[in-house]
């Protein structure tokens, strides 16, 4: 995730420093961020000149201390492990000034737990970038128990300046906001396959070609207001009793995993990837996202050179995961 976040920050005019416990991964992260910027230039979302400036703003450092020098915001994007993140936040607090904002990109942990041992928690929050973070505008700003509202508002302003679509989540709960909705969709989608109501192919087609295609312009609550609340209540009361409400993943997951069918990397999961290219699917997703960004007018803000007054925004850890 780190390189994608770094690309977005650099395109917005920030100097960005990547650091990792493995310096080779930090250096590789700079190359990956450059590839993300190239993809945006090739897709016509960023001017070539702005892409060159953005690339020049990203560098890696081998020590955390060097990476943190001059930072106004540190985005932690390391392994999803509570104890490891807690230790890093202690290091961040020891090596940054009181006014430096410290955020985590955690997808599943509570920021309140991550910063348990941090003294000044008012300047901490989750900033959950959605993958692929250089293409998806959503960033969830999750306020922990100690987060100062002014910090959340400032993060929202900064991210709006990046061309992102930040939302503030006021309670520090598992799944934040959007992942709660996504996990509910996945639970119902997998329950439909398990029950034999439809195949995995047809479930994905129904979502991609129906509600999914509509969602960028038509949110679920805008849908409710359009059809009218009385009709929606009637449909809900009729349909909800038959939906899956299990508090754990449906048993089909366990059966597939036991068979070694753990997903695209294994060649099979809900879909059989031996006859289909997963890389083609990823490329198609990125092409679609870039077209959607064009349509939504969400190109990256034009960068104005490396001396535009922005202070550094180190991303202390980088990732090459996709
Ligand atoms: N992959 C996704 O789709 C996705 C989406 C949103 C959020 N996230 C979150 O972002 C974070 C990173 O995920 P990822 O998929 O990029 O992980 P990743 O495993 O690809 O990268 C993590 C990097 O952190 C480094 N690292 C581990 N411990 C470290 C430490 N103590 N100090 C410095 N560097 C350290 C590793 O060397 C690695 O390069 C996680 O919290 C994850 O939950 C991931």
Image (spheres, rainbow, N blue to C red):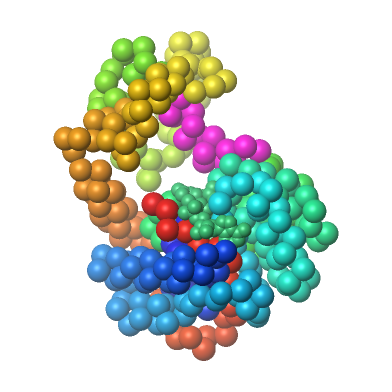
Give left or right: position of 46 versus 237: left
- Number of numbered discs visible in the structure rendering: 0
Query: Residue sitting at 73 percent across and 72 percent down?
Result: 96
Give left or right: position of 287 versus 23: left
Query: Residue sitting at 35 percent across and 23 percent down?
Result: 259
Whether residue 63 is in magenta: the answer is no
Q: Residue furthest left?
A: 275
Query: Residue sitting at 57 percent across and 64 percent down?
Result: 21
Give left or right: position of 175 versus 218: right
83 in relation to 55, above or below: above
257 in relation to 303, above or below: above
**Residue 133 position in % (x across, y down):** 44, 57
Which quadrant would residue 108 be assigned to in this image?
Answer: top right
Q: Is residue 292 visible?
A: no
**Residue 230 position in % (x across, y down):** 50, 20
Residue situated in front as seen by the camera: 67 or 120: 67
User: Mostly what secondary structure, the magenta segment?
Assistant: helix
**Residue 18 position in % (x across, y down):** 52, 70
**Residue 261 position in % (x across, y down):** 34, 28
Q: Is residue 216 visible?
A: yes
170 in relation to 319, above or below: above
Query: Residue sitting at 37 percent across and 45 percent down?
Result: 217
Residue stretch in magenta = 173-189
Give left or right: position of 78 versus 154: left
Residue situated in front as seen by the camera: 238 or 312: 312
Q: Residue furthest right?
A: 119
Whether residue 174 is in magenta: the answer is yes
């Amino acid at each position: 995730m780190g390189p994608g976040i770094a690309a977005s920050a650099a395109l917005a005019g920030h100097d960005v420093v990547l650091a990792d416990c493995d310096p080779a991964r930090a250096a590789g992260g700079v190359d990956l961020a450059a590839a993300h910027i190239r993809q945006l230039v090739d897709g016509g979302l960023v001017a070539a000149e702005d892409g060159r400036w953005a690339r020049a703003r990203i560098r890696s450092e081998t020590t955390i201390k060097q990476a943190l020098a001059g930072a106004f915001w540190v985005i932690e994007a390391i392994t999803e492990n509570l104890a490891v993140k807690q230790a890093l936040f202690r290091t961040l607090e020891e090596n940054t000034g009181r006014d430096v904002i410290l955020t985590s990109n955690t997808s599943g942990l509570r920021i309140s737990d991550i910063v348990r041992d941090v003294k000044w928690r008012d300047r901490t929050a989750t900033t959950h970038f959605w993958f692929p973070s250089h293409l998806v505008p959503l960033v969830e700003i999750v306020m922990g128990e100690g987060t100062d509202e002014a910090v959340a508002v400032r993060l929202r302003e900064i991210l709006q300046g990046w061309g992102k679509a930040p939302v503030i989540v006021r309670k520090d709960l598992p799944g934040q906001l959007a992942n709660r909705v996504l996990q509910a969709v996945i639970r119902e989608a997998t329950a439909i396959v398990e029950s034999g109501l439809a195949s995995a192919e047809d479930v994905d087609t129904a979502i991609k070609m129906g509600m999914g295609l509509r969602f960028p312009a038509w949110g679920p609550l805008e849908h409710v207001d359009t059809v009218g609340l009385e009709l929606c209540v009637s449909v809900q009361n009729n349909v909800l009793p038959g939906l899956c409400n299990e508090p754990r993943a449906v048993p089909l997951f366990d059966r597939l995993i036991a068979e070694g069918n753990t997903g695209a990397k294994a060649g099979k999961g809900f879909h059989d990837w031996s006859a289909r290219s997963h890389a083609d699917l990823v490329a198609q997703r990125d092409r679609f996202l870039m077209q959607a960004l064009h349509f939504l007018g969400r190109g990256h803000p034009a960068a104005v050179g490396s001396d535009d007054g922005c202070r550094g925004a180190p991303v202390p850890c980088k990732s090459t995961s996709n």
